Image (cartoon, rainbow, N blue to C red):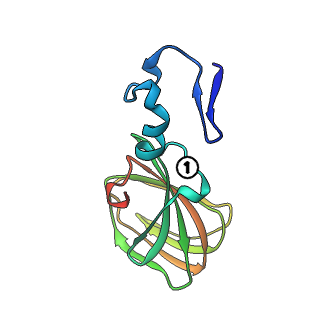
């Protein structure tokens, strides 16, 4: 499917079938997507947040998933907790200890993981760095 440039930040499908964006009024799609759904986020548009003392950024958020970038510092820890979201992550940099279920693993750059919904897990920072986490569905407490 061809795409048309709406502005330098967003491409929309080149179609007259407005069912492509069922929640949007097609002429207002750019405003709705950028301000509310946050489907396309430029690096200077991320929402800075904090959870249990850990700084992170909310990146793209859709109806069924959310992407975050965790910015860990040495000494950051996230105690055992659970949430109704599946959580998958990719370690960009740093070194960490993750615990959930029968797993206790040390993770470093290039490693990834998936934690099922409602499973207690914890996270300890050994060397500070960045981790991308994807939550399905989006975590409402992060918005």
Q: Position of residue 69 (x, y in %)?
A: 54, 61
Seen at 51% across and 14% down, the residue is 16
Using the rendered image of the protein, determine whether residue 113 is visible from the camera's viewpoint: no
Q: Secondary structure at mark 1?
A: loop
For mark 1, does the 10 Å Cα neighbourhood hold few (<14), some (14 to 19), or many (20 or more) residues?
some
Please identify the residue farthest to the bottom as the structure is shown. 75
Q: Which residue is mark 1?
A: 41
Seen at 63% across and 61% down, the residue is 111
Picture mark count: 1
Please identify the residue farthest to the top as the structure is shown. 16
Seen at 48% across and 44% down, the residue is 34
Q: Nearer the viewer, residue 119 or 26?
A: 26
Q: Position of residue 27 (x, y in %)?
A: 46, 26
Using the rendered image of the protein, determine whether residue 92 is visible from the camera's viewpoint: yes
> What quarter of the picture does the C terminus occupy?
bottom left
> What quarter of the picture does the N terminus occupy?
top right
Quarter residue 120 falls in = bottom left
Q: Position of residue 37 (x, y in %)?
A: 42, 43
Quarter residue 36 falls in = top left
Q: Nearer the viewer, residue 143 or 64?
A: 143
Q: Is residue 77 above or below residue 104?
A: below
Query: Relative to 121, is 70 on the left or the right?
Result: right
Seen at 62% across and 42% down, the residue is 9
Q: Nearer the viewer, residue 16 or 94?
A: 16
Q: Is residue 91 above or below residue 79?
A: above
């Amino acid at each position: 499917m061809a795409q048309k440039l709406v502005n330098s930040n967003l491409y929309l499908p080149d179609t007259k079938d407005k069912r492509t964006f069922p929640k949007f009024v097609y002429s207002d799609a750019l405003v709705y997507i950028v301000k509310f759904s946050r489907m396309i986020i430029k690096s200077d548009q991320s929402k800075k947040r904090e959870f249990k003392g850990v700084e992170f950024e909310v990146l793209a958020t859709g109806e069924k998933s959310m992407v975050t970038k965790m910015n860990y510092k040495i000494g950051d820890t996230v105690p055992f907790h659970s949430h109704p979201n599946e959580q998958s992550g990719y370690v960009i940099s740093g070194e960490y200890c993750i615990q959930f279920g029968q797993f206790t693993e040390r993770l470093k750059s290039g490693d990834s993981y998936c934690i099922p919904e409602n499973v207690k897990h914890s996270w300890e920072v050994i060397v500070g760095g960045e981790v991308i986490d994807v939550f399905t569905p989006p975590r409402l407490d992060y918005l």
